[in-house]
Amino acid sequence: MALTTLQFGQCGNQVGHELFSTLAKDIHSPKPGVSARDNELYIQNSVNQWFEEDVDSKKLFARAVLVDTENKVVQESFKKQSSNRQWAYNERTCAVRSGGAGNNWALGYQRKGPELLESVSEALRFQNEKVDRLSGIFSIMSSAGGTGSGVGSYIMENIRDEYSKKAFFNAVVLPFEAGEVVTQSYNTLLSLAKILSVSDATLLLQNDHLHSMLSSLLNFKTVGIGDLNSLIALKMAGSFQPLQETPFSMKLNMSDIIARIAPHPAFKYFCIKSSPHVPKESRRFDGGCQWSVLAKHMRQMLRTNILSSDSVSLDWELKQPSSVPPSVHSTTQFSCSVANHLVTRGLAFSNNQYRPEEDFVGRGMHPRWAPENAAFTHSHQTRRFNDQDKFAFLVSNNSQLHVPLNTVVDKAWKMFTHKAYMYQYLRFGLMEEDFVDAFVKLESVVKAYKELGKNQMSYI
Ligand SMILES: Nc1nc2c(ncn2[C@@H]2O[C@H](COP(=O)(O)OP(=O)(O)OP(=O)(O)O)[C@@H](O)[C@H]2O)c(=O)[nH]1
């Protein structure tokens, strides 16, 4: 099953580059921990999903289209790969204009998007006609600038019909709350609202949260953009690299996961939680941790504080799993999930000792309308990942997602009531009604996720 990745703007291109580097590193892992045959099968599946392989040189070419309104980042991607012998981009799959999009969704959506549409469509066709079975289109962008958000939403909207039978999903990087772009809340609001009607599912990635993970779990003294991207790429690759059929877990590909994680049109967002993130020098730890401990730790990440309606009380993703069972406060409860998909990678998983569904399926963990067997799925892959014996990922669509979405709506609304920076958008043809429509759409999503949270049950 093949996917084509669309990389939009500075962030989309940098994250995309890091994703393909992580995938190539995983493919070429010197210590896969499985038989040569199983390793070969995994590599074949992974290459088919993400890359084109040159028959003679065996070099991998990313099945990607690079889109930007400035040449710089795309050029840098090509420069970086001249020293990289494992994989490359194909030069025919770039769609680039000059001038930038000035951190303005309206400039990106109204001007630059239409200018780029034809070359993006051509580049996509060039990539896709080489593929036997295309399963989906995966777009990556940030929401704060003008290109990722504006051009990204315009292109997604305008190519949707051509790929109406394919999984169509995207990853959006949300800006730092104390962000560097003054109009970032408007851009985020407008792009999330637009993408909502065209994407089957949207992975939300929060720069602030990723930053906290790197500083508190991996002890980074300073965190650069490249570090954030490595973590994003790790989460994506860990969740979407090939999985295997076992007696107790399901072999799902990326589009199966998307269909399961966002089964309802009102709940199309998801996040990826992962553990354990261990500094290299203390890697001894991860092999010693039981799968049951790791899976229970992942479940803790679904806890919220019932005394605070707006925030997650203790973020368990910022803690290392401990072999001591967590002490649980009566003030915490599980957030209600539309769906959770647990991916475990590494040492064999035996369900004689532990069945994760016992921890992830139960009273109040899912809305009443969600069939319990579909609301939680588990997939395993025995091949080692990221040079660790055990790594778990939780792809989760749960009520906590209302928090980052609500923050965006609140901040944008405060600016909108003062008409702040509106002229920048109106001069590119946007109208106040477009903002009002976007607020209505996103507020209804926030409300749906908040209501979902009311299904949650106190810990018993
Ligand atoms: N995680 C991550 N965030 C990034 C990266 N590059 C930029 N950002 C964030 O993305 C937002 C800015 O968006 P960009 O992608 O730079 O902008 P753009 O889409 O290229 O749009 P224009 O600059 O207006 O043409 C800010 O919130 C940055 O913090 C990156 O490589 N990784």
Image: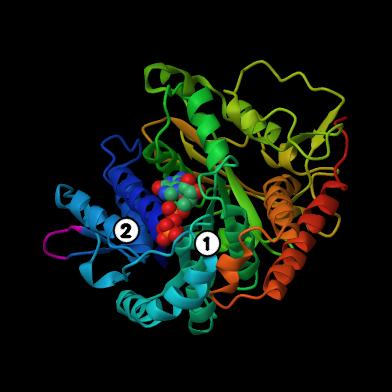
Labels 1 and 2 touching (C-beta < 8 A): no
Residue 372 percent across, percent down from the top left: 77, 53
Q: Height in image: 26 above or below 137?
A: above
Q: Most prominent secondary structure in the magenta stretch?
A: loop
Residue 150 percent across, percent down from the top left: 51, 67
Q: Height in image: 48 above or below 415?
A: below
Q: Is residue 56 left or right of residue 216?
A: left
Does residue 199 appear in the picture of this structure? no
Please tell me whether residue 57 belongs to the stretch shown in magenta.
yes
Q: CA distance from mark 1 to mark 2?
A: 20 Å
Q: Is mark 1 within 8 Å of ligand 1?
A: no
Residue beneath label 1, please? 170
Residue beneath label 2, please? 47
- Quarter the N terminus occupies: bottom left
The residue range painted magenta reads 55-59
Q: Tell me the mark number nearer the camera, choosing from 1 and 2.
A: 1
**Which amino acid type is shown beneath numbered disc 1?**
Asn
Report the residue that reaches farthest toward the left.
56
Q: Nearer the viewer, residue 119 or 134?
A: 119
Where residue 57 sits, quadrant-wise, is bottom left
Q: Secondary structure at mark 2?
A: helix
Q: Secondary structure at mark 1?
A: strand
* Neighbours of disc 2 within 10 Å: few (<14), some (14-19), many (20+): many
Where residue 179 sits, quadrant-wise, is top right
Residue 136 percent across, percent down from the top left: 47, 69
